[in-house]
Amino acid sequence: MKKLLFVLLLTAFASGLRAQELNAKVSINRQQVSNTKSGVFDALQDKITRLLNESAWTEFKYRDFERIQCTFNFTIDTYSETDNSFTGSLIVAGIRPVFNSSYTTTVFSMTDKDVAFNFQEFDQLEWRPEQVDNNLTAMLAYWAYLLIGMDLDSMSPMGGTSVLQMAQNVCTNAEMMGFKGWKAFDDTKNRYAIINDYLDGSMEPFRQLQYIYYRTGLDHMAENTENSRAAIAEAIRLLKESHENKSLSMLPQIFTDYKRDEIVSIFSGQGTSKEREEIYDILFRINPSQNNYWEKIKQ
């Protein structure tokens, strides 16, 4: 009996270490689709949630409290009961806790405008990397790998390389299905462009900034504000370098879009005027559309 109890406890401990990587919240906005029963949309939300949260995407070991908080918010523009087709968009975001605080920070957020797939109410969603033949599961796998890889980059220098390469492999294999979002040079912000730029050698400063911004910057903000702000300023300089290395990449601009409020709060009225002016100049050159916010840094 004692031996059996020991085996059960050991199994429970091992399974705790092997917990899935994601803790995703999924929403389906179908307001633009009228005169359609809700069953297929409820099933879609449930099946997507299960795939994201119950799949073991990598070989890494995650405890429950280490799972990556993320959101997948779908907006469905069209739905056809005739061929079970859906089109729309997806806002995906990954969220990371900041050490020694109750604060959470966005590691990545973007709108995928190329959402198109087929789904029936009783379909089972399964990700099989060796057989990419379903655009919905391919999209979910791509974003899962990207969020996990970027989270790992924020924990150790370029620590997510192997997982990010899985996202790149999804692009390569999914292109042959003929759906938008996977092809090179179709769009500077499609799935292919995002992962291709992120793994491009010339964009290595952008990957380096992930660790510096989060691990040496935000994670120490509670204990040493001045040093943390200096580390984040260093990360912003790496943002500038990555923008100069590959000016057509949208990653630096996307970064400033979802980090806008946070960066402003860190530098507004803080540090020297010279430092604030430098940070303002970098951000304005990368994303002038947000200048109303960048102006606050100089105040």
Image (cartoon, rainbow, N blue to C red):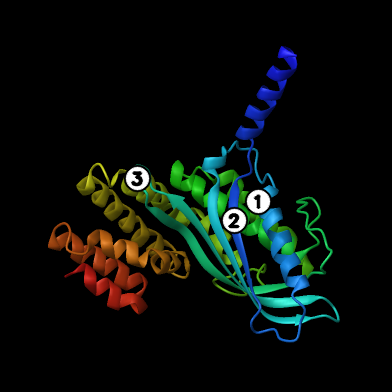
> Where is 229 relative to 19, above or below?
below
Give the residue type at disc 2.
Ala
- The answer to which quarter of the image holds residue 253 is bottom left
Quadrant (top left/top right/bottom left/bottom right) for the C terminus: bottom left
Q: Earlier in the sequence, mark 1 or mark 2?
A: 2
The picture places residue 286, in percent across and down from the top left corner, at 36, 70
Specify whether residue 178 is in view. no
Residue drawn at the location 33% of the way across and 62% of the way down = 262
Question: Where does label 1 land, which residue?
Answer: 53
Residue drawn at the location 61% of the way across and 37% of the way down = 60
Marks 3 & 2, CB-CB < 8 Å contact: no
Secondary structure under tag 3 reads: helix
- The answer to which quarter of the image holds residue 137 is bottom right
Marks 1 & 2, CB-CB < 8 Å contact: yes
Q: Is residue 29 left or right of residue 269?
A: right
Specify whether residue 262 is in view. yes
Question: Where does label 3 land, which residue?
Answer: 219
Give the residue type at disc 1.
Asn
The picture places residue 81, in percent across and down from the top left corner, at 83, 80
The picture places residue 133, in percent across and down from the top left corner, at 81, 61
Residue drawn at the location 48% of the way across and 59% of the way down = 108
Question: Where does label 2 land, which residue?
Answer: 24
The picture places residue 218, in percent across and down from the top left corner, at 33, 49
